[in-house]
Amino acid sequence: MKKIAIPFFTLLGLLVLFSCKKETTGPDEILIKDVGLKVSFQGNKSGDIFKAGIALTKETPTSYNIGLKSATLVGKNGTANVELFNKSNLSSSLVFDFTNNTTAYSLLNGKTIPNGSYSAIEFEVYYLQMNIAIATTTRGIERRNFRIYLSDDAETEGGLHQPCDMTQINNSQEVGWLMGKTAMPNMDPASPRSAAYSSDGNGVNWYVFGGKSAKDYGPFGNLEFVKNAPHPIFKTKTNFTLVEGSGSKIVIDFNVNNSWQFEDKNGDGIFGPQDSDSVSPTAWHMVLPVISVTQN
């Protein structure tokens, strides 16, 4: 078994895949029987730096979900692309729910991958979701499911979500937007869509806090992401790095240790409404995973 650790610094490196070279075929022939996806919650990952001079408190989520629209193996040297799945809309996207370090899901969705030459894998990503602690004003500490969207279903299918929208999920149902126009006493979600920090649901008009646009203090704390992320569907294409070996099953491991990071303005160690400040906007973001790939 071979394991390779890959630092994950940018969204455009969201999904890194290693393929297996079949010894009995030509140098470009790749045998892939299965592609698995898993999440690890422990590790030495410290996360990206948010902004110079801002100290961030770090938390590891207790569960982590990934919502994918599509996945495609990209062929080369005459090999055709292999579409593993492609869902028509957000509501039918493939959602992978992780609560432990051992569960792995196959991405093949019933497909058999022909032997051939493959150069990359391409994904369309709807959202990432995590369960974190929230220090409410009157109800104590609660566990919440926060979802952060990477894609714009408002533009593509008449939905409500813009890239960087942050919503709360209760029992698989979206109950409203967070970190937006209205600071609720217990950080409860606000509804309707007009309360989100990207006003009007157009991803262009942003509420201003203390003279600073909300797009500078969104989930990734990065204005460049808002400006340059593929739109309306977040798509990332990652080239393969070939690894010698006899295995034909590969597992992509997302390490999400310390992936929730925030500016703890009241010093209690838990994110909550006491940390919200419209005059000096609170820094917060979801750090993207460090990925390792195991070949079996």
Image (spheres, grey):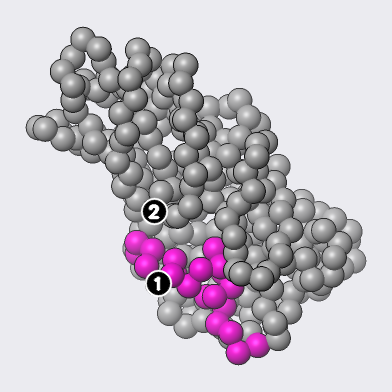
Residue at disc 1, secondary structure? helix
Quadrant housing the C terminus = top left
Q: Which residue is mark 1?
A: 227
Give how far apart the Cα atoms at labels 2 and 1 are: 13 Å
Vertically, is 176 above or below 35?
Answer: below
Looking at the image, residue 59 sits to the left or right of residue 201; the answer is right
- Local crowd at mark 1 within 10 Å, few (<14), some, or many (≥20)? few
Q: Residue at x 39, y 27 (%)?
A: 35
Q: Which residues are magenta?
A: 210-232
Q: Earlier in the sequence, mark 2 or mark 1?
A: 2
Question: Please, what is the three-letter code of the amino acid marked with disc 2?
Answer: Leu
Q: For residue 248, what is the image quadrant? A: top left
Which of the two residues, 3 or 214, is positioned nearer the viewer here?
3
Q: Which residue is mark 2?
A: 12
Percent position of residue 218, x then y: 57, 69
Q: Residue at x 66, y 71 (%)?
A: 53
User: From where the camera sits, is residue 192 visible?
Assistant: no
Badge count: 2
